[in-house]
Amino acid sequence: MDVRLPGITAEGETARSLGPAATGILTVVGPFHVEVVADALQALVVERIVPLRTDAVEIEAKFVLAQPWNHDRMIRAVQLRQREIAAGPIRVSRVVIPKLPDHFIVGEGVHRSFAARQRGDLVIDAMVTATLHVAPEQFCIVGDTLMRCTCDGTFPVSPSGSAARPVSREAARLSRDVIHVLAALGCAVYPESQYGVVSQGFCPCFKVVGL
């Protein structure tokens, strides 16, 4: 959903993180900002598949995680869509989420995605450049630290999607907003006082069988 914010008039080239301030639009999934949702999903990636060939397909516009961030580009995209001028497919990564519809993180075409939603389009043409499989049950959060749970133990991992190897606790820290989304997706959350217990082999995300 694209929520309009009153009294915002900033225009021109603006940092992506200040998108709502430049456009007067805050795009949300339920109570969460779409950019926070995208960050949370990327933190849970356990497999990335890149296709050998990428053809344009139709994807559902309502599951595209796109926050317009530049006022001029947003207006231009809306005007082109209103005039039925083809702008070409967007480029996205498909995120496969257990028990939820696939979502799409936009690599190119954020403003075209917004314009399609404003026009009422149910689908939008897209090139799916990668498929990301996420697994909330393989992660947990201790305090503000993202942990990967494996049969060999539990260790801090980077929220950027590099969950295969341990990192420092500083590199594994999460923002409070991302923690809320991860908890909503099913990640177990433990207090800071349990960090030592979890990191020293207690693996709450897996059931060990056959012992």
Image: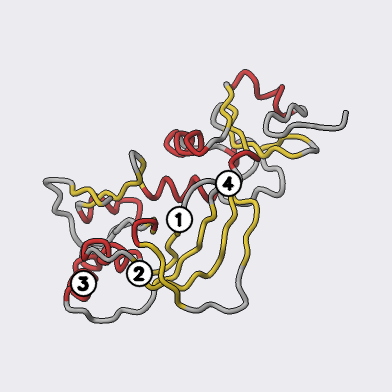
Between the residue at mark 1 and the residue at mark 2, the CA separation in whole angstroms equals 13 Å
Residue 56 drawn at (x, y percent) = 45, 77
In screen coordinates, is 194 left or right of 65? right
Quadrant including the C terminus: top right
Q: Residue at x 64, y 42 (%)?
A: 157
Q: Are marks 4 and 2 in contact (CB under 8 Å)?
A: no
Which badge, 4 or 1, comes first in the chain's sequence? 4
Disc 2: CA contacts within 10 A as few (<14), some (14-19) or many (>=20): many
Q: Nearer the viewer, mark 3 or mark 1?
A: 1
Label pair 4/3, CB-CB below 8 angstroms: no
Residue wearing tag 4: 44
Q: Position of residue 100 (x, y in %)?
A: 48, 48
In the image, residue 28 above or below residue 145: below
Q: Secondary structure at mark 1?
A: strand
- Give the residue type at disc 2: Ile
Q: Which residue is mark 3?
A: 76
Compared across the picture, whether 157 is left or right of 81 comes to right
From the top left corner, tell me how far across and down residue 173 is, in percent: 55, 37
Mark 3 vs mark 1, CA separation in Å: 25 Å
Decide: is 182 above or below 15.
above
Q: Which residue is mark 1?
A: 103
Residue 124, label in figure: 2
| Residue sticking out furthest to the top | 193
